[in-house]
Image (cartoon, grey):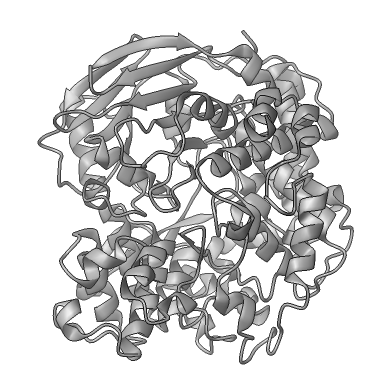
Amino acid sequence: MMSGFMGKLLRVDLSTRMIKDEPINEEWASVYMGARGYMSRLLYNELELPIDAFSPKNILTWSTGPCAGTLTPGSGKYEVCGVSPLSGGWGDSSAGGFFGWALKRTGYDGIVIMGKSEKPVYLFITEGGGELRDASHLWGKQTFDTEDIIKKDLGEKSARVSTIGPAGERLVRYANIESDHGSFAGRMGLGAVAGSKNFKATAVVGEKNIPIARPEELKKSYDAYLLEYQENIAVNLVAVHGTAGMISTFNELGVLPIKNWQGGYFQEADDVDGTTLTATIGYSPYCCFGCPVTHDRKCKVKTPKYAFDAHGPEYESITLLGTNTLNHDLEAIAYASHLCDLYGLDTISTGSSIAWAIECFEKGLIAKKDTGGLELEWGNIDVLIEMIKKVANREKGTGYLLGEGVKRAAEKIGHGSGAWAVHVKGVEMSAWDPRALKMMGINMATTAGGARHTPGMTFFEINMPQEEFGMEEPIEGIIEEGKSKALVDVQDWSMAMNAAGQCLFTGAVKPALTVEFVNAVTGWNLSWEDFLRIGERIINLQRVFNIQCGFSVGDDTLPPRILLEPKPDGYAKGVVWKNFEGLLKEHYDLRGWDINTGKPKKERLLDLGLDDLAKDMWG
């Protein structure tokens, strides 16, 4: 068995209560690595597509990469994969913290969950295997409470728990999966898939050593990383103030979502920036296993109305719950984010859905009779908090409707409300406005998981050089030309790095080091080009997966508000897309995808060793 891999998966059928060990496929591990790469192949092979995400036949997986749990920086990651109830296609989500490290130390590289249990259950995994336990007493419990109760039930304070909250149980289509009292696998609604299976949580306890092929080489690369880290201005900003430290800077660059993406500049941005958070409610930096980048903050709010003491809000949560609904009370926004954490709600989709509903209310498409008497209005933090509760509990009316996500909600409401439903492939847009970051827009339009920033972090559009991708100097985000090849390389690298079990926060320091870490851990000798090719292979596999789910070239677009409406003020004031279709075609050409069908061309699939996919697509 290759170093970095534990050599087996745990397969669980909830319908029959079958639990068995399964050796990992070494060929797949060598060409897809691990995490979402390996599981992309497994799910493509085993699912009959298309499939309803809530069908018992959908499969849900937890997995790690070869670097997970090692000295590699940012190696606390784990991945959850399955068909997304939000998009209806490929779904994946990664989370940090310590659960991934703990899962690896049980001796398993991943978990495969099939079927549906008749009653609520959770899975307990040790080095000796797994067992299903009754979770009836946990059903309805919030995420943090569930973690604590399971640890007490097991008598294992060191156990790490990955769980859903009430939102997942009630099938909110953007429910997430929580671990470590504040780390989340969000965006794609995979917490709702777990809920549909009556699967509450996974608890793990293990102490196995993770094999390292060349430990001295790994230490050398780690030392090189620390030197680069100390000199990286952007990463150090995150380390000092968390991801919220980007808010004022991104406001100046026209990146923030404001008033359901209608605004261009937020006057009160400094009120909610990371510097303010650090000076007021943030009392302790937090980092995941093996990571020196303290991207998160423990926060304490004493105001009785909003009191809590836990992980605080990050950039995406503050902006989508705050600036996008025109709220700037940092304590209240932090509490709103904390509520989402307890219920197991994705903060990005929650904030986006509520902002869409406020605009609908403003335009007379939603009334008080639909909202339980609430008057939805911009800047009303109490309304925001009450709507979070209604969504999580799937209350009749607007609460239930918003739990479907903005795409389905707009289809239900009609009357042109789709024009301000900001999503791609049914997935609400994360807080990186493509009008100010044109390559981020092409990334969001073309990735399998919809409007997400992480598959293609175009740092070269926000004043950071990325030399490995041919961007020795940054290029303004509003410029459309000269960045397409860099985006493709960034996407390939991001996908490969995730498959390896590494985090974007640390990878951004010096991308080339990510390959060194993989080689040191596994004993491989991948070149930079080999590494990118692994990412490209996974991207094409997920592309074919989505096509089998019914997606086509028409789904590779941006919402009308982003494509057609210029920003009214700020850095990107008046900027419109000059050549979106041309940039999309350029991306297709570089990818080797057919411009008429959206399918990867047969020769490209064959070149990547995806012969069976070439046959599935082209016969």
Q: Give the percent coordinates (x, y) of residue 111.
A: 41, 24
Relative depth, front residue between 37 and 134: 37
In the rendered image, the vertical position of residue 42 relative to residue 438, given as above or below = above
Q: Give the percent coordinates (x, y) of residue 430.
A: 53, 64
Q: Is residue 213 left or right of residue 84?
A: right
User: In which quadrant is the N terminus drawn?
Assistant: top right
Q: Is residue 87 left or right of residue 456?
A: left
Q: Give the percent coordinates (x, y) of residue 305.
A: 20, 74
Q: Give the percent coordinates (x, y) of residue 327.
A: 39, 82
Q: Residue furthest front?
A: 619
Asked where in the image residue 112 lies, by quadrant, the reply is: top left
In the rendered image, the vertical position of residue 383 relative to residue 491, given as above or below = below
Q: Is residue 176 left or right of residue 440?
A: left
Asked where in the image residue 69 lies, by quadrant, the reply is: top right
**Res. 470 in view:** yes
In the rendered image, the vertical position of residue 364 relative to residue 535, given as above or below = below
Q: Residue furthest left?
A: 137
What is the number of callouts on the image? 0
Residue at left offset 58%, top offset 48%: 448
Residue at left offset 25%, top offset 23%: 14
Residue at left offset 30%, top offset 80%: 381
**Res. 502 in view:** no
Relative depth, front residue between 207 and 498: 498
User: In which quadrant is the C terminus drawn?
Assistant: top right
Asked where in the image residue 30 lies, by quadrant, the reply is: top right
Q: Is residue 520 left or right of residue 172?
A: right
